[in-house]
Amino acid sequence: MAGVMRGALLWASRNRWLRKRVPRYRFVRRTVTRFMPGEQIQDALAAARLLEGQGLGTVLTHLGEDVADPAEADAVTRHYAGALGRIRSAGLNSTLSVKLTHLGLGLSLQLCQANLERILQQSNSKDTVWIDMEASPYVDATLDLYRRVRRTYANVGVCLQSYLYRTADDLASLLPLGPAIRLVKGAYLEARDRAFPRKRDVDENFFVLAQTLFGSEAQSAGTRTVIATHDRKLIRRIEDLARSRGLTREHFQFQMLYGIQRQEQLRLAKDGWQSSVLISYGTYWFPWFMRRLAERPANLAFLARNLISG
Ligand SMILES: Cc1cc2nc3c(=O)[nH]c(=O)nc-3n(C[C@H](O)[C@H](O)[C@H](O)COP(=O)(O)OP(=O)(O)OC[C@H]3O[C@@H](n4cnc5c(N)ncnc54)[C@H](O)[C@@H]3O)c2cc1C
């Protein structure tokens, strides 16, 4: 049943008709505020400041994907370059995470690479700029582009998804680069011939991939790891694994999404780990919001409560 609901919500996330209409409803907009502090960058910066005061790092992402023309991709690139300036002038310890289809990957790899490099040129070499991983048709192009920019920029990282069968091979092929990898379970609707259909296999593969990331080959290549999950059982296993390998907060960090498992985010920071929060902002939130609902269908009850309370 949960699988059917997840499939329906992920289907809805790609539906243009719903995308145009659903965001008009006030109860939906109210529910979205659980997962993002606001639509404007200043909302994200204000939230980042509060979280920093609680010992948490932050990563900002401007919502959007699949731009239709180069001018739109250019505007997104300029926005991100400006965002880095705003982060710096606010004195925040924050970085960015970008979707390549938002920078024009669907239009041209060269255009997208040039846009990504414009952002990287503005970045501080100490802070990793993250590349999100989108649906499986984009994985090859995303990794290709990652390899190209990694030659010039050490401070660029890419996300890998444990639900894909191919990820173990992708990770092995990236290790010689000394990559920065953000490991997630995966948020898109994928066919059974590409992704593990059973959640417990996705979870177990996450742990296996974490073992590779914490292993001697990855560590001696200088791999930097982000464990991006809200799964407390998995987090405990990974904390134990890190301790058994003698890894400390310098070697890896945990990341979660804004508004999810807040106590666990703070607990990890209190226990001495690096713990960061990914904050989304922007007006193009419908597909992203549907993916958040799909991750936890119980969120639909929250949506329903907001409908009833007017
Ligand atoms: C920092 C970060 C970056 C990400 N980047 C990408 C990316 O680039 N590409 C990609 O495909 N996916 C990305 N994701 C999403 C990821 O793939 C998962 O869909 C998402 O994190 C849910 O899986 P989970 O690991 O938390 O585990 P799950 O087993 O799904 O969840 C574990 C527990 O966490 C809580 N939880 C999880 N999700 C929610 C939610 N939406 N609302 C309320 N509670 C929830 C619930 O208590 C649940 O029982 C990212 C996630 C994070 C944290």
Image (cartoon, grey):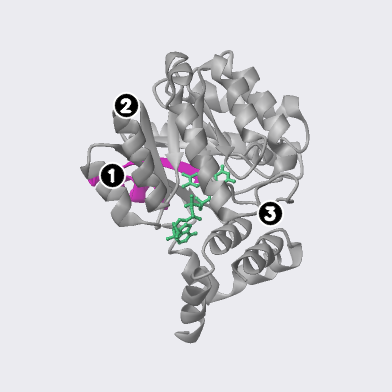
- Is the residue indicated by label 1 positioned so its CB lies within 8 Å of ligand 1? no
What residue sits right under mark 2 in the picture?
Answer: 247
Q: Foreground residue, 295 or 282?
A: 295
Would you identify the image quadrant in which residue 297 lies? bottom right
Mark 1 and mark 2: span between their CA atoms? Answer: 15 Å
Mark 3 and mark 1: span between their CA atoms? Answer: 30 Å
Q: Position of residue 61 (x, y in %)?
A: 51, 44
The kind of secondary structure element at disc 3 is: loop
Q: Is residue 59 magenta?
A: yes
- Quadrant where the N terminus lies? bottom right
Which of the two discs, 3 and 1, labels the residue nearer the N terminus? 3
Q: Amino acid at mark 3?
A: Leu
What residue sits right under mark 1 in the picture?
Answer: 268
Which of the two discs, 1 and 2, labels the residue nearer the N terminus? 2
The kind of secondary structure element at disc 2 is: loop
Q: Amino acid at mark 2?
A: Leu
Which of the two discs, 2 and 3, labels the residue nearer the N terminus? 3
Q: Residue 112 vs residue 259: left or right? A: right
Pair 1/2: label in front: 2
Which region of the structure is painted magenta? 43-61
The residue at 75%/40% (across/down) is 137
Q: Residue 95 vs residue 190: left or right? A: left
What residue sits right under mark 3 in the picture?
Answer: 189
